[in-house]
Image: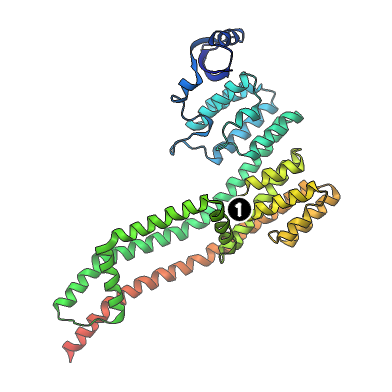
């Protein structure tokens, strides 16, 4: 059955766009007319595809949907559903409410799909880059259980906590990144503008041999001036190479292992992964998603293949009649406290509550670790910056001190 993209007006004169399957344009026009719409234009979906490049997850670099926009979308959606507003009317209001251009187009298409008889979860599933498996799974569970407003609110809470966690990580890393950027800028400026003038002055004064510190700085300065493009090529090559390596299965595994083992930041990444696992699984189980489906969704939502594999092994064990805790403990990716809390939750039938408490604990641990890390990095980076600048100053003044000594003698 072919699909047709149409533009129509409702009884109030408002323009409505969408895509729907039908035997022919005439059949679809009659269906829309029966629903109170007056069709102004219609063409097959293949023809419309080029005019609507944002559908089905094809986004340009400048039209992305942020997680914060999605959390607001889910919160407002849940509020209106709870107030008894119809699904189509909710989507209409949300489409007008949002200021994100990409999300506006998506909501408009979802509204057309729902009007055409599709379920909300199925319509959202067309956009995997925007709505994750977790979001689609929760909406589907809410539709089946008749508690769509509850699951949307839980999804909003989950997204808000995820946004807050990411905000804390970014805030903690902002200061070190700024200091490193300033340090690199200062070094490049001194080595390309100031150092060459000092070297030229020393050579005019007849200095034949330089101290080792000055020689290191001289060689580095000449490299930057003559072969600066090599530095850019190396940096770009490393960046692109690591990016492509991460896209391969083997490369992604090694990258995830490094993320968990790297000093200082490895423990932080591990805690973030445990917090995300606990929060996601708790949200799914609370919403009534079956445990096997929930574990599969959680594995897909994690950004670390090593921990995701441990979750999938636990899922396979559950299918064979075992408990969740044993395979998680065997993987050695989950701390004993987490395993014990999960085991207690299984025994008492309160697994979702226990996972929620684990998530709260590890989110607090991440917050404390970030604060400690920031407090330790600030003086360390200042000392490092002072050492670099001090080395450059000393390297430049040592030949000058030698010249002054010769003149004094």
Residue at the (64%, 27%) spot, across then down: 120
Give the farthest residue toward the right.
Answer: 348
Q: Position of residue 295 (x, y in %)?
A: 71, 46
Q: Nearer the viewer, residue 206 or 311?
A: 311
Q: Judge whether 24 appears above or below 88 on screen.
A: above
Q: Looking at the rendering, in which quadrant would you find the C terminus? A: bottom left
Residue count near mark 1 (Cα–Cα under 10 Å), binned few <14, some 14–19, many ≥20:
many
Q: Position of residue 259 (x, y in %)?
A: 56, 59
Left or right position of 13 against 384 = right
Q: Judge whether 346 appears above or below 202 on screen.
A: above
Left or right position of 203 against 97 = left
Q: Nearer the viewer, residue 235 or 386?
A: 235
Q: Position of residue 45 (x, y in %)?
A: 50, 21
Q: Judge whether 38 appears above or below 79 on screen.
A: above
Q: Judge whether 219 appears above or below 138 on screen.
A: below
Q: Nearer the viewer, residue 402 or 29?
A: 29
Q: Position of residue 313 (x, y in %)?
A: 72, 52
Q: How is the image coloured?
A: rainbow
Residue identified by numbered label 1: 304
- The answer, for residue 363, to whether it is visible in the render is no
């Amino acid at each position: 059955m072919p699909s047709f993209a149409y533009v129509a007006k409702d009884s109030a004169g408002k323009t409505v766009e969408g895509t729907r399957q039908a035997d022919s344009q005439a059949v679809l026009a009659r269906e829309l007319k029966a629903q109170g719409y007056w069709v102004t234009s219609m063409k097959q979906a293949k023809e419309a595809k080029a005019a609507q490049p944002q559908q089905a997850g094809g986004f340009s670099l400048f039209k992305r949907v942020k997680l914060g926009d999605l959390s607001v979308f889910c919160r407002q959606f849940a509020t209106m559903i709870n107030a008894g507003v119809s699904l189509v009317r909710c989507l209409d209001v949300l489409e007008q409410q949002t200021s994100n251009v990409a999300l506006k187009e998506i909501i408009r298409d979802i509204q057309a799909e729902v009007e055409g008889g599709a379920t909300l979860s199925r319509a959202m599933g067309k956009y995997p880059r925007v709505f994750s498996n977790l979001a689609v799974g929760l909406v589907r569970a809410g539709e089946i259980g008749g508690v769509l407003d509850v699951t949307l609110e839980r999804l909003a809470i989950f997204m808000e906590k995820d946004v807050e966690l990411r905000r804390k990580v970014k805030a903690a890393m902002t200061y070190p990144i700024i200091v490193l950027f300033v340090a690199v800028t200062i070094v490049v400026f001194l080595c390309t503008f100031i150092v060459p003038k000092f070297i030229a002055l020393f050579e005019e004064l007849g200095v034949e041999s330089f101290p080792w510190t000055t020689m290191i700085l001289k060689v580095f300065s000449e490299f930057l001036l003559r072969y600066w493009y090599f530095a850019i090529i190396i940096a770009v090559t490393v960046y692109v190479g690591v990016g492509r390596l991460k896209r391969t299965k083997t490369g992604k595994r090694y990258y995830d292992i490094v993320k968990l083992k790297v000093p200082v930041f490895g423990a932080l990444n591990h805690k973030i992964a445990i917090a995300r696992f606990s929060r996601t699984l708790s949200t799914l189980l609370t919403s009534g998603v079956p445990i096997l489906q929930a574990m599969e969704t959680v594995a897909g939502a994690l950004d670390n293949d090593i921990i995701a594999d441990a979750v999938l092994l636990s899922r396979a064990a559950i299918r064979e009649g075992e408990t969740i805790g044993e395979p998680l403990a065997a993987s050695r990716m989950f701390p004993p406290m987490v395993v014990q809390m999960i085991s207690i939750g299984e025994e008492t039938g309160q697994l979702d509550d226990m996972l929620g408490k684990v998530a709260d604990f590890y989110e607090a641990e991440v917050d404390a670790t970030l604060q400690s890390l920031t407090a330790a990095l600030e003086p360390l980076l200042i000392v490092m910056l002072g050492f670099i600048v001090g080395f450059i100053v000393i390297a430049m003044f040592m030949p000058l001190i030698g010249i002054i000594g010769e003149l004094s003698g």
